Image (spheres, helix red, strand yellow):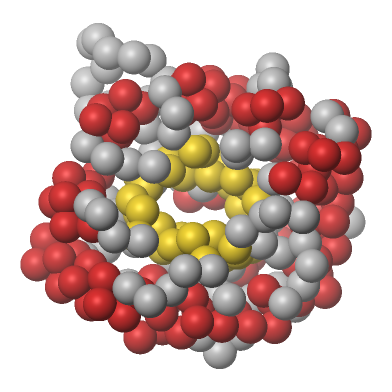
Amino acid sequence: MTRRILIAGNWKMNLTLADSMALVEGLKKEAASVSQVDIAVCPPSVYLQPVAAALKGTNISVGAQNAYFEGNGAFTGEISMAMLCDIGCKYVILGHSERRNILGESSELVNLKTHAALAVGLTPIVCVGELLKEREANQTENVIRRQFDGSFSGVSAENMKKCVIAYEPVWAIGTGKVATPDQAEEVHQAIRKMIEKNYNKEVAEAVVIQYGGSVNDKNAQEILAKPNVDGALVGGASLKVEPFMGIIKSA
Ligand code: PEP
């Protein structure tokens, strides 16, 4: 098994430019000796370029929180995947639950974006996850399967291996209610089975599946110890050097 742990910080719509640069400088120093874990930060789009420039040549990659699927043209307010590549991004988060639930993003749209990201060589971090009421109605696996099938429709086996999936139960995002390690492992296993069913075992074993939802430096070790949890997508705890580095170190 060759999967590497990926710890990615989703800054969401937080921090000023000065805060962002201070955070990046702190992470750069603290993470310089980390070699066994892949690290990424995903700042707001207006800060992508200075953050990418500051992290050039380091072991910390940069990702965007969203982008559009069209290459260019009259799409006011949008940013293309090629533009992200142009400024040095490696990752793009797609289908985050806040985009699905607040901005009405469908799996069909996520699918177009996934294809567009792969076409320019960006690694999509595709988020899936159930609402609390869906978990309570025993619908978790059905919901994830619909999101998985919709988001990855038409993606080739070779490209699927390059994708990252973030399992983020919506009830655990920003709530302090982390899924138990067993709850996370159960869904991660189910996702790996979905990949195997749609592709094959080799592809299933290659895909990095992150957990996201109130991960911090206190609970990360237990969750990351699970065999099918290959990293974390971190919101709140990625906004300061100490907790984010704590998570990286526990990985
Ligand atoms: C996220 O937004 O992807 C996330 C997991 O947030 P938090 O860690 O704050 O729950």
Image quarter hosting the N terminus: bottom right
Q: Residue furthest left?
A: 18
Residue at the spot 77% in from the left edge and 37% down from the top edge:
203
Q: Position of residue 217 (x, y in %)?
A: 51, 85
Position of residue 110 relative to residue 223, above or below, is: above
Q: Is residue 166 visible?
A: yes
Q: Is residue 241 left or right of residue 106?
A: left
How many marks do you count on the picture? 0
User: Is 150 situated left or right of 67 in this image?
Assistant: right
Instruction: Name which residue lies at 72% across and 77% down.
Output: 225
Vertical placement of 246 versus 194: above or below? below
The single residue placed furthest to the top in the displayed view is 73
Residue drawn at 77 percent across, 72 percent down: 226
Quadrant of the image containing the C terminus: bottom right
Q: On the picture, is 125 further left or further right than 187?
A: left
Front residue (pair 99, 201): 201
Residue at 69 percent across and 21 percent down: it is 156
| Residue 95 picture location, percent across and down | 53, 40
Q: Nearer the viewer, residue 222 or 236?
A: 222
Taking the image as drawn, is residue 175 in sight?
no
| Residue 125, image x, y percentages | 53, 44
Nearer-the-camera pick, 189 or 136: 189
Image coordinates for residue 12, horizontal then vertical, percent: 35, 57
Q: Is residue 43 above or below residue 238?
A: above
Q: Please name whichever residue, 113 or 172, is drawn nearer the observer in this view of the structure.
A: 113
The picture quadrant where one finds residue 28 is: bottom left
